[in-house]
Amino acid sequence: MRPHSRILPCLISGLCLLQNINCGNILVWYTEGSHWINLKPVLDTLVDRGHHVTVLLPNASIFMDLNETTSYNYENFNVSLSTSDLKNAMERFFRFSMYEMDHMNSIEIFFKFFEIISKHLDMVLVYCDGLLHSEPVLDRLRKGKYDVIFVDPVYPCSRPTTFCEMMGKADIWLIRTYWDFEYPRPFLPNFKYVGGIHCRPAKPLPKDMEEFVESSGDDGVVVFTLGSMIKNMTKERANTIASALGQIPQKVLWRYSGEKPETLAPNTRLYDWMPQNDLLGHPKTKAFITHGGTNGIYEAIYHGVPMVGIPMFGDQSDNMVHMKSKGAAVIMDFNSMETKDLVDGLKAVINDPSYKENAMRLSRIHHDRPVHPRDEAVFWIEFVMRHKGAKHLRVQAHNLTWYQYHSLDVFAFLLAIIALVLFIFYKILKSCVVRCCFRSRSKKKKE
Amino acid sequence: MRPHSRILPCLISGLCLLQNINCGNILVWYTEGSHWINLKPVLDTLVDRGHHVTVLLPNASIFMDLNETTSYNYENFNVSLSTSDLKNAMERFFRFSMYEMDHMNSIEIFFKFFEIISKHLDMVLVYCDGLLHSEPVLDRLRKGKYDVIFVDPVYPCSRPTTFCEMMGKADIWLIRTYWDFEYPRPFLPNFKYVGGIHCRPAKPLPKDMEEFVESSGDDGVVVFTLGSMIKNMTKERANTIASALGQIPQKVLWRYSGEKPETLAPNTRLYDWMPQNDLLGHPKTKAFITHGGTNGIYEAIYHGVPMVGIPMFGDQSDNMVHMKSKGAAVIMDFNSMETKDLVDGLKAVINDPSYKENAMRLSRIHHDRPVHPRDEAVFWIEFVMRHKGAKHLRVQAHNLTWYQYHSLDVFAFLLAIIALVLFIFYKILKSCVVRCCFRSRSKKKKE
């Protein structure tokens, strides 16, 4: 459902000349879920720096809220979907990823996944249509003289074109990871790794939460959340987890809106919402149980907290493999894990000092960069506005066809030359052989 | 002779823990020519920031001068070469590149080039031997507890190893270009593009030079130098050039230590040395005639001056092709150019506004980056000291053999499986066919 969930937004430069950088006109395309949460700190910083930010807001959206007081403008458009349609689609996807998948064979998973992706793409097109078929909105956008458009590619929408072509038009890609998380590998000059854009130093906790955390003594606390999308799970899973949490000496803060599990121990408190970043930055926090979304992982890296990963869907499994291979996490399987597995996992990351050391090493790498990721993101957005794009960073590969990209035309040409040379060589050789044989035979005949 | 002349230095981390970043202990390996000129601003900045910089200095060196008053220490070592041997070798190479090559066929060039490169490598080994066979120097280096070694790979030297293996050990590569100069392409996370490290705003010119420049009126001046290595040329070439310079309305400042050409016009003045950066930053400067070294090109980019390139050797031709393709330069062939060619080239870059516009565009790209290149270079040197390396940026490809790198082991394994499957399939088919035929024949016989 979110094939590029680690890629934050791309910037496509607008057409009008920016006279004064303090009045930059920025258009933001609709996105959803953790992607929207991740975009907001950048938009807030842009507004703080004097830019006008306008967000395209459909009438059906879960995370983007018209009633929220923000400092950016909204440009509304209507789509032939309701928020509950969207919620149902997400719910279906979570059910598939969290439970159904485990009871399917590979072929069933393939077809079910294909069906879900198709439905997601249909929904993306509904949003795209909603905007492109609304002449009044388009007219206002044309008159808006925007300098740059800021797009999360998880909801693609464009001019009639292919996905690849549209992606290739981006001037700058802000990638929401960094080399604390990524395996080192080649990348392009218009890729800017701004992972941790939303992380901030911890603020004080609410009074009752602080008291609960402090009551943990030297054992400290464990912070547990499965992210902003997962509100519920089966009774059986909730009981398995709650019973594991009861077996560790730490106090546990669990973000969970479902029914209170019967096995919930006194050391564990449930919360509808938690100040996750402030908790992870608290000196008493010993471990973080996470679904492995990049936002949460980055808050843990920022504060140097080792992790127990319970990945659910999308890129979360892959994210947790990164953290495990860097020695800062263990991974659990949500469906098959037993109470003992979770207890062992928690004890490992809390008591084996290597996990904390590795988390702290990643944290040092994270903090020790020449430019803060938020400043770097803002710098490149303003760069695109100042220079009307960033064509000098865009590889020419985008202008090649697939056979040019793989040098097949060059190979074909070289092969044709080799074939021609071989053919000529063969013809010459043949004619030589024929003449020699012919002469020797006619000689013999004469003899 | 300088196959990596665009790659500045790599950093190989030392072994001792840096307690206090203000007392970092930095060792710098010997380098020569424009490479040394380019290294100095970084070393000066490191000293300004409180680090101890020690430069390995052989007794035979053209550009590194023991008598120069600098703020870094020198560690001397002896090599079985004299400075005049080194000068002769360079002279031979320049003669080959500037004159002899034009009278040779491709095969002669290939063998001559191979001979020159072999001699260069022999010389490199002489320097390496000079250090590694001097036990007292090595002993002092061991006791020096250096945090980092700063190496220009044009003079490689290491423990017994291959060139590739040694290169792969670098923690950070400081590349002395940027995307104002480079064509966009993939690169590795430990490549830091710090091109323009030595560029600074122009300082006022010496009084007589300023008077000469000002006397040019609206026509302005042309700055001409073939770099720090080329001091001389044949009389015929000097006269061709001087006569061209006499035909333009601009005043010309020419860095030239050879005999005064007979065709020298009153608008042209010769100088043994020029404040190149200050001249290029002067508002009267209309064009820069250059051999195409990266240092000079970067000063022209910094100040937005269009170029006439007369490349001589090494990477200079390639550098100028970059500038030509970006519309900021024309290229001349040193040996074949006539007076008219140079006049036409100069008139083009001075009178056709596109050259100035493109040079200014590159200049804007150059200046508009999140971090100044000198600060970025210093940041990564200090990073390597703080973290005892930068292993998180180093690709695992360095640890693979050539057949692993090209996935040949994977292909071989897959091919073996396919071959096995085909073989089994063939055997089964054969036995089926044999049985069927055998049965039908025996049936026929029975009938």
Image (cartoon, coloured by chain):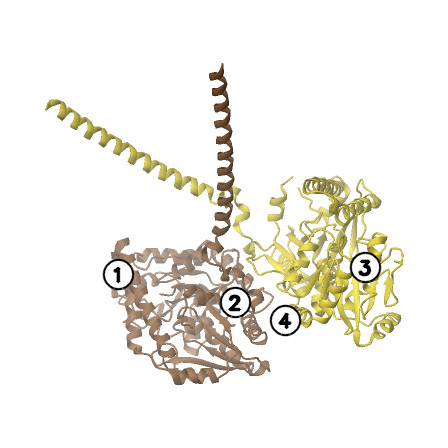
Chain colours: A brown, B yellow
Q: Which residue is mark 2?
A: A194
Crowd rating for badge 4 (residues with CA inside 10 Å; few <14, some 14–19, many 20+): some
Pointer 4 indicates a residue of which chain?
A: B
On the same chain, marks 2 and 3? The answer is no
- In this view, the residue in front, B417 or B260, is B260
Give, as a three-letter code, the residue at label 1: Glu
Crowd rating for badge 3 (residues with CA inside 10 Å; few <14, some 14–19, many 20+): many
Which x, y percent locates residue B313?
73, 51
Please name which of the two marks, 2 or 3, marks the residue nearer to the observer.
Answer: 3
Q: Which residue is mark 4?
A: B368
Please name which of the two marks, 1 or 4, marks the residue nearer to the observer.
Answer: 4
- Secondary structure at badge 3 equals helix
Give, as a three-letter code, the residue at label 2: Val
Give, as a three-letter code, the residue at label 3: Ile
* Residue name at image x 81 percent, y 50 percent: B62
Please name which of the two marks, 4 or 3, marks the residue nearer to the observer.
Answer: 3
> Disc 2 and disc 3: Cα gap in Å?
51 Å
On the same chain, marks 1 and 3? The answer is no
Residue at the far left: name it: B447
Which x, y percent locates residue B398?
55, 47
